[in-house]
Structure formats: C-alpha cells, structure tokens
Image: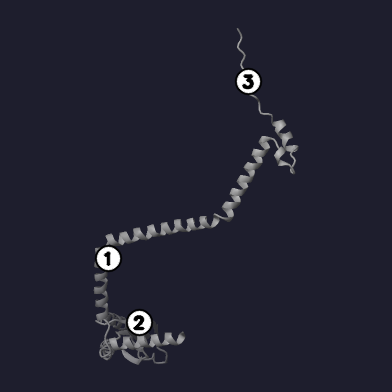
Amino acid sequence: MKVSVSSSPKFDFQQLSEDFKRLNSNDPGTWPLIPKITVLAGIFVAITVLGAYFLWMDQFDLLSQAEAKEVKLKEEFLDKKRQAVNLDLYRQQLEEIDKSFGALLKQLPNRNEVESLLVEVNQAGLGRGLQFELFKPSAEVVKDFYAELPINVKINGTYHDLGAFAADVAKLPRIVTLNDVNISMPTGKDGGAGAGRMVMDMKVKTFRYLDEEEIAKRRQAEKAKGGKGK
C-alpha cells in the first residue's frame, strides 16, 4: 500500500511580481490580497515614522534632557555625599587655614607700625656699612584687605655687605620683599664710592593690613562705583 505525501504549495514570486505590475491605482479594491497587505504595511510604517519625527521628537528631546539631568543630579549627590563623609576633615583643614592666615596677618604691620618698619630697613643697611643714595617711599597700592607700600632704594657697598643686608631684611619679623634688584659697578674715575663697592638699585616692598574703617570705606566706594556703572 502506497501513501502519498502532499507537498506544501510553493510561493510563486513570478506570479507575485505580475500581480504588482497589474495593479490599478484607480481601483485598489480589485488588488490581490498580498499587494494589499504589502501596501497597507508600507503605509503603516510611513505613518509611524512621520509621527515619530513630527509628534514624538519633542518628547525624545525632553527624555534626553531628563536623562542628562538625572546623571548630573547623581554626580552632585555623590559629590555632596563625599563632602558630608569628609566634613570633619574639611573643618579641620579650614581651622588650620585660618590659623595660618592669622599668623601671616600678624606679620603685616598696621598703619602706625609702618614708620618703625621703614626705620628697621634703614638700620639694616646702615648696620652693614652701606650708604643710602636713595630711600623714597611711593604711594600706597591698596588691595583687598592690605596695602602695598613700594620704596625705591639705591645703596652702595661691597658685594658681601649687600648680600648680608638682603639676608637681614629677610629675617625681619614683618614681611618685606626685595624686587627688581639691579646690581652694578659704580661709574667714575675714582670708582664711585670706593674700590670694590657696588651699587644695588631695587624696589623694596612692605605691606600693612587695612583696618576695619578703611575696609568699610573701600567697600562703600566700590558699591557706589558699581551703582554708577548701572
């Protein structure tokens, strides 16, 4: 007894191609089933793509912005968490900075102590046998909380004594800096101030802190200046 096995129908691509060629655009109702399904699927895809582009694009942008904001907020949270964990350490560092700042501030003379500091600088030079050809304080330059007092100084002496003078100035209890230092040999037939002597031309700077009254006046002046600018 023989059993016949029916094979599944084969898909006829040639027939499908002929169906698409014979489509009547004026009468879609007569189209075969497969072309109808294909065209409807294409229309659905086109509508979906256009809808996504014109209607959902703003939503996509908002979603992207929200995701970026979420990442930023997470980073801020982690940063604040680290700060909270290390809060005691930060406070300790702040106290150390305040102490260091206070120590440096004490090295700045007040308005009444500047004159005595200038005398100390002068005495440091005379104590090393140096001769002052120029010692001329210039106008103060006011900064945020301190004032800078530049002094044009020109002295002559031996190289060793000039170096010792610079070392003595560095050891003063107040902050004094030597700037724009220029050392040269004296001119003249007799060697200027004497054989082996040199001339040091420089700008000595010392500093003083502003008192509360000066700081208040400075802030008022800046506030008035800002108001006029508006």
The residue labelled by disc 2 is 144
Question: Would you place residue 72 above or below residue 194 in this image?
Answer: above
Query: In front: 195, or 88?
Result: 88
Query: In front: 224, or 102?
Result: 224
- Mark 1 vs mark 3, foreground winner is 3
The residue labelled by disc 1 is 90
**Crowd around label 2: few <14 · some 14–19 · many ≥20 (10 Å):** few
- In the image, what residue type sits under mark 3? Ser
Residue at image coords 31%, 59%: 81
Q: How far apart are marks 1 and 3 (CA)?
A: 83 Å
Q: Distance between the residues labelled 1 and 2?
A: 25 Å
- In the image, what residue type sits under mark 1? Tyr
Q: Which of marks 1 and 2 is nearer the N terminus?
A: 1
- Residue 88 on image: x %, y %: 24, 64
- In the image, what residue type sits under mark 2? Asp
- Residue 102 on image: x %, y %: 25, 77
- Mark 3 and mark 1 in contact (Cβ < 8 Å)? no
Q: Distance between the residues labelled 2 and 3?
A: 97 Å
Residue 54 in sight here: yes
Residue at image coords 35%, 82%: 144
